[in-house]
């Protein structure tokens, strides 16, 4: 039975995972705190983690109906993420493990997103191709076993979610921007603006979203504030279509090159209806299995960290006492 802690960005998370089964999965989102700033403020996130982490760990143990005495290992996200935020989780996990002389497992945050697919019900066994698109990361992960993944391609600049968040700001919408863009895009024409699909002809599997963001900024500048208000739905729909087009084009290219029997999605952008629909069509055409984990397992959570830890070797007590967060 693993107690897992995740504090890499703006969600304070703790979970108890037992052989792929989620005994508890507690998430305290700081989104409302950061909304006022239009994005995550790292220092503010770290301070909130500090206040929240102990009660969240207690809640995870309570909801699982267990105590620290029942736990056999502590798992924690060691990186990548915001350094101040990570330090809170790593220090907490070290303290708990050291006090109980428990082994400890360090987990890579992105491996966690992949490992969300290993959880009950209906765990997905490797091999599979996993597209992870969140506020901090965009990558294609080739998963051949439970211990890790191979990065087949990744963004060279902004993450997909980051681009959506910035686009929402340009369009005068709220934070987080992805759901706002999706909501407004529902009434818009995705073909109204010809936004660039970056690296469409580039043979690689990497992504780029900064040019798309700049194209929106220019379109908005040309329209002026009155024009933006008038064309907001078309701008949002066209922008969303360009993001999804790039994500699915690279996914298809990776499928062409490998022999992947299944596809999985992860990260907050995986909640996007258009992306889910398009990936569903692609898998249907190719006869591939598509695994879509529940929305609360797509976004940051600690159950996925526990799931990743189950496939890894723990460090014995007290070998981990010298650990630090890895940015
Ligand atoms: O995985 P996540 O919760 O946190 C990070 O690790 O970053 O992802 C958050 C990102 C934000 O950029 C947010 O705008 C985006 O996921 N997002 C969406 C949707 N819901 C959240 N993007 C598009 N459509 C959505 N429905
Ligand atoms: Zn994440």
Image: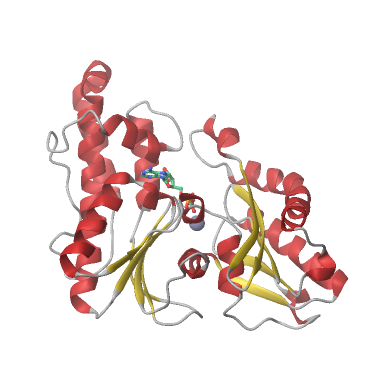
Note whether residue 78 is visible: no
Q: Residue at 59%, 61% (x, y): give it.
A: 303
Q: Measured from the top left, where is residue 45 in percent x and y?
A: 63, 45
Q: Measured from the top left, where is residue 221 in percent x and y?
A: 24, 27
Q: Nearer the viewer, residue 219 or 33?
A: 33
Quadrant of the image occupied by residue 151: bottom left
Q: Is residue 314 left or right of residue 248?
A: right
Q: Residue at 46%, 67% (x, y): give it.
A: 122
Q: Residue at 35%, 56% (x, y): give it.
A: 157
Note whether residue 25 is visible: yes
Q: Measured from the top left, where is residue 268 in percent x and y?
A: 43, 50
Q: Please tell me how many numbered marks the rendered image carries.
A: 0
Figure quadrant of the C terminus:
bottom right
Q: Nearer the viewer, residue 321 or 224?
A: 321
* Residue farthest toward the right in the current orientation of the protein: 99
- Identify whether 13 is placed above or below 227: below
* Colour scheme of the rendered structure: secondary structure
Q: Measured from the top left, where is residue 29 in percent x and y?
A: 60, 43
- Identify whether 218 is placed above or below 286: above
Q: Is residue 7 left or right of residue 255?
A: right
Q: Nearer the viewer, residue 88 or 4?
A: 4
Q: Nearer the viewer, residue 19 or 80?
A: 19
Figure quadrant of the N terminus:
bottom right
Q: Residue at 60%, 76% (x, y): give it.
A: 310
């Amino acid at each position: 039975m693993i107690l897992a802690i995740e504090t890499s960005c703006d969600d304070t998370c703790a979970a108890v995972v037992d052989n792929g089964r989620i005994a508890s999965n507690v998430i305290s989102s700081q989104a409302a705190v950061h909304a006022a700033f239009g994005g995550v403020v790292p220092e503010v996130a770290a301070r909130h983690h500090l206040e929240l982490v102990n009660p969240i760990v207690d809640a995870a143990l309570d909801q699982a109906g267990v105590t620290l005495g029942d736990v056999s290992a502590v798992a924690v996200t060691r990186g990548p993420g915001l350094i101040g935020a990570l330090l809170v989780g790593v220090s907490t996990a070290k303290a708990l493990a050291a006090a109980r002389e428990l082994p400890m497992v360090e987990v890579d945050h992105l491996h966690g997103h992949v490992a969300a697919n290993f959880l009950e019900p209906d765990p997905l066994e490797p091999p599979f191709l996993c597209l992870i698109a969140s506020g901090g990361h965009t990558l294609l992960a080739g998963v051949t076993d439970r211990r890790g993944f191979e990065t087949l391609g990744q963004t060279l600049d902004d993450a997909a979610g980051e681009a959506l968040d910035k686009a929402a700001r340009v369009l005068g919408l709220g934070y987080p921007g992805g759901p706002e863009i999706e909501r407004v895009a529902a009434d818009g024409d995705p073909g109204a603006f010809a936004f660039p699909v970056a690296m469409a002809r580039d043979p690689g599997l990497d992504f780029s979203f900064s040019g798309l963001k700049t194209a929106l900024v220019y379109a908005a500048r040309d329209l002026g504030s009155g024009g933006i208000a008038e064309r907001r739905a078309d701008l949002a729909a066209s922008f969303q279509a360009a993001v999804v087009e790039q994500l699915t084009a690279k996914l298809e290219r990776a499928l062409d090159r490998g022999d992947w029997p299944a596809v999985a999605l992860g990260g907050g952008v995986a909640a996007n209806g258009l992306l889910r629909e398009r990936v569903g069509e692609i898998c249907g055409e190719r006869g591939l299995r598509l695994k879509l984990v529940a929305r609360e397992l797509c976004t940051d959570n600690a159950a996925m960290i526990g799931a990743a830890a189950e496939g890894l070797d723990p460090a014995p007590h007290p070998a981990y006492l010298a650990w630090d967060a890895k940015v």
